[in-house]
Amino acid sequence: MAGLIQEENSSSITSPPVHFFHMMSLSPGLGSPYPWLRELKSEERGLYLIRLLLACANHVAACSVENANISLEHISHLASPEGDAMQRIAAYFTEALAHRMLKGWSGLYRALNSTKISSSSERIMAQRLFFELCPFLKLSYVITNQAIMEAMEGEKVVHIIDLFSFEPAQWINLMQLLSTRPEGPPHLIITGIHEQKEVLDQMAARLTEEAENLDIPFQFNPIVSKLENLNVGSLRVRMGEALAISSVLQLHSLLAADDDMLRRNSPSSSMNSSSTPLSRILPVNPRTLGEFLKKDFAILPSPSSDSASPSSPFSLAQSPKMGSFLNALWGLSPKLMVVTEQESDHNASSLMDRVVEALKFYAALFDCLESTVTQAHTERQKVEKMLFGEEIKNIIACEGPERKERHEKLEKWILRLELAGFGRVPLSYNGMLQAKRLLSYGYDGYNIKDENGCLFICWQDCPLFSVSAWRFRRYE
Amino acid sequence: MAAASSSSSAAMFFGVREEGQNQLQMNQEQHSLATPTSSTPPTSASQTSKKKRNLPGTPSKLQIVCFSHYSVNFFDPDAVVIALSPKTLMATNRFICEVCNKGFQREQNLQLHRRGHNLPWKLRQKTTKEVKRKVYLCPEPSCVHHDPSRALGDLTGVKKHYSRKHGEKKWKCDKCSKRYAVQSDWKAHSKTCGTREYRCDCGTLFSRRDSFITHRAFCDALAQESARHPTNVNTIGSPLYGNSNIGIGLSQVGSHLSSLQDHRPHSSASDILRLGGASRSTLPQFDHHLLPSSSISSSLRPQQPIQSSAFYIPEANQDYHDVPNKQLHGLMHLPDLQSNPTPPSAANLFNLSFFSNSNANNSAINAHSNADNENSSSSLLFSSQFTNGSVMSESLFSTSIQQESMVPPQMSATALLQKAVQLGSTTSNNNNGGAAASASLLRGFGSTSSCNPKSANHSFGGFLGENENNLQDLMNSLACGNSSIFTTFGGNNEQGTDYGGFNIKRTGFDEGHKQQQIATAGVGGSDRLTRDFLGVGEIVRSMSGGFSQRDRQQSGLDPMSSLDSEDNSAPRF
């Protein structure tokens, strides 16, 4: 600023640009504000930020710390968690990139994060806000519920396993639908899985209350567990219960695997070394799994076949966890399983691929959040920081089992689920209508697309989430 | 009506046969349906129609598949199933009189009309043979009524079904914001809306119970949840982001501004004066509350452009403590950038700002005199540049751009990414042809976006002398309302967009250097054959290119030249 004021008083005509050069050539470490950068128009700045971000990611990918540091320095003058969409995106991406670099110095990294309070409650709140502010989760719920209604027509006992049970609204909605069934409401059992007991307690209270209001026989089984540690055997599904599984943005976390370990391991040893709690648990259903393996050849994404061929044509199921989890679910012979996933490819092994894909995906998410949330600025920021920002950080900064946000596109899920023995159930036209109706309550810019019975929830033309429905398919 | 429509569609059908060559276009679904099982005459037509395909791009008026004995309907196995394309289905007046261009919904009516012109006409008599019932398919493949077994019984029914279920909802109820695709539905709803409805606690109205229930599942939960987490609400916002008065003050200004936008140039002067007063009255607020402006201002920025213009003002305040005048100007120039500029208005505005601005400097006078001679758009541009403080001119100008490009006040991140991709691919087609022209354009661009009045002044002469047209183009493109200073430049020269902010810096170099630089850069473009995704390589290269130029002259800027060194590793995707 001092420079500018001085400039105003100076009578030199040609000097200003040169003057800027001087400012630019100042060592960036001085924290000079680069006034010209501040005065870029939003669009210029956005384009410039994209450039810098990609260049920076390149440096980070190449482990060139010096250059990355310089890039980050540059970006820091332009990015801001409170600026326009691209500025905010850039802020979160640089944070993620910096985290990744810092992880190289594990001591530094740990020291910096040593007093960090684990913010699961904050994250839950961010998820709630995301649910409230954006229609995505609601849409997913509406579509899921519609599919459940159709699949459970005439069923007397309906059991639902909710793999991420944090939002009662979905099941309140279902209860209301069930209560209007011509044949009367069924007996409803919901098994809710969440790592926080309080969340499940809230769910239970809320749902029980609603069930009483609607006079539906209801039972809630809370299971306090992380999904990856879930003992599928503990999910008691009794005879005569029609089972539906709802997974909203959860399955991808099971793809997390120690990539290095998988690569290192010889096929024979992989089973033992990668024995996670889940894979230890899985043989709970030994017959199914055993039969399954016998009957269904090497292509199945079972733990052994999987790591046996890490370079298999579909590099699909590098994760033993995923394979065994799906197999276990399959073993419960669900009548319906509805899977909502991020429609994006954030599971590439190359960092640059992930950065680019994440940039595309989160740009759209930031945009739609911004366009939908015009009033509550702080709420938007919370979602951005605690949900999107954390996801971005996870995608970019983490590797191996730590990297949970392994979003993959529907085409991969279809392959994977089909390999696990599930058959696709086309989502009905009604589900789409319900979803569109929900969107008509003041959500502009969103869209639902039907592709071969799977639905894509889109922001403008960009598909952001996929919803697909599956059922247990018996192997004959 | 039934008779009319049936005979008309028969006519349509024959019309198809006559004009089959250029009118028929069948899509795959229709093909799959076309398994004619009978030997009655119409099938031959359907077969002809199957063979003839439209050339892509030729407008097809009719798309008909007809099966005479296709057993589809349980009640009437002999019903004729008709599949119309969406376009045909929704066309209101398909039958056009070639004499007066009047359109008719039905062939019969056109024929009757033709009689009035003394043209040959042919009315179809009601045949003595029994008329086949017709059923219609919904053209939407995913729809249940796309299946012949669930075809709909009458044409209007299909039309309504199609617009309701698959069409755009153009009619919006003012009371409850519910949207309708069919006008009559909307009318019917409007009559009852508010009389017999379900009202959710959140204030939304529903005229139908089922929509209300769907809504309530979420709304109810929503209310519960937010009651449980009261922290979410704006209560945090106010202490953190300062006084809510600010918002009010800004919105006041905003409303003044928006009212000004509509004024014609001649009346605007007085309004501006009034506005100046109004803005002055709000100023103390800015002074007190906005001075630590960074957080507040950015909190405002995502809002409408008007607010963003207000946002820039406090920043200027911060720098210069010259509040009233800046403020006044910030406000004053909006209307002139908005309205269609005519020379007198530009001059008026200019005078006004000149006299009221204690800060007006010599360059302003220059600009003024120039403004009289030059075409209005340039004078406009320059008046806005010169009459304001240095920071102001930039922010103002950018504000005006935002105003013009409107709807999304700033480019969405998605759009930016797309643009980045586009730039990446267009630059790979780079040619050297436009180097000279682009040089001048760049200069123009540089000066308009330069934040320093003197640098603008410097390029002023050359700017107006050589590049009036460019400037005018620029202004036009701004006025057009597309977001496009960039497009304009992108069209002429990708360098302009590529360098973005850097151009600004270059502006002040002496002419020779500049030309040289740009020429080199342009030539450098010729080796850009790699078409990499997102243009990363491009980006990095162009960045480093731009900087290394400067590097050589300034031998500063290590950071960027280090980017240069990464040049080759960049195109990873």
Image: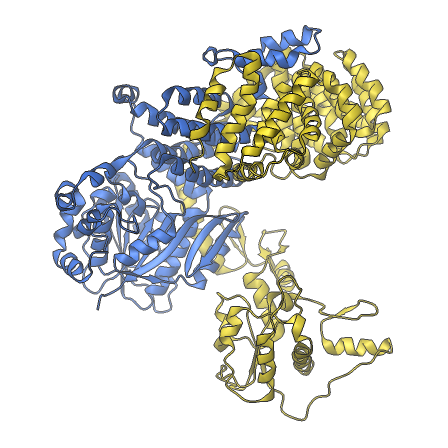
Chain colours: A blue, B yellow
Q: Is residue A476 left or right of residue A133?
A: left
* Rendered position, A350 above or below B59: above
Residue located at (76% from left, 83% from top): B123
Residue that protrudes farthest toward the bottom in the picture? B128
Front in this rendered view, residue A316 or A8: A316
Q: Nearer the viewer, residue A119 or B544?
A: B544
- Residue A285 placed where, x, y %? 14, 55
Q: What residue do we see at 71% from left, 33% from top?
A: B258
Identify the image quadrant of residue A361: top left
* In this rendering, position of residue B135 left or right of residue A423: right
Can residue A257 be spotted in the picture? yes
In the image, what residue occupies the spot 56% across and 32% down?
Answer: B302
Count all numbered tags in the image, as a single digit: 0
> In this rendering, is residue A254 above or below A70?
below
In which quadrant is the N terminus of chain B drawn?
A: bottom right
Is A186 placed left or right of B11 in the picture? left
* Residue B252 in the image, given as x and y percentages of width and height: 67, 28
Q: Is residue A42 visible?
A: no
Q: Position of residue B87 (x, y in %)?
A: 63, 65
Query: Relative to A147, is A226 above or below?
Result: above
Residue B314, x across and y down, in percent: 62, 19
Using the rendered view, name the quadrant where residue B382 is placed: top right
Compared to residue B76, the image places residue B300 above or below, namely above
Q: Residue at x 63, y 9 (%)?
A: A5
Q: Is residue B21 left or right of residue A179?
A: right
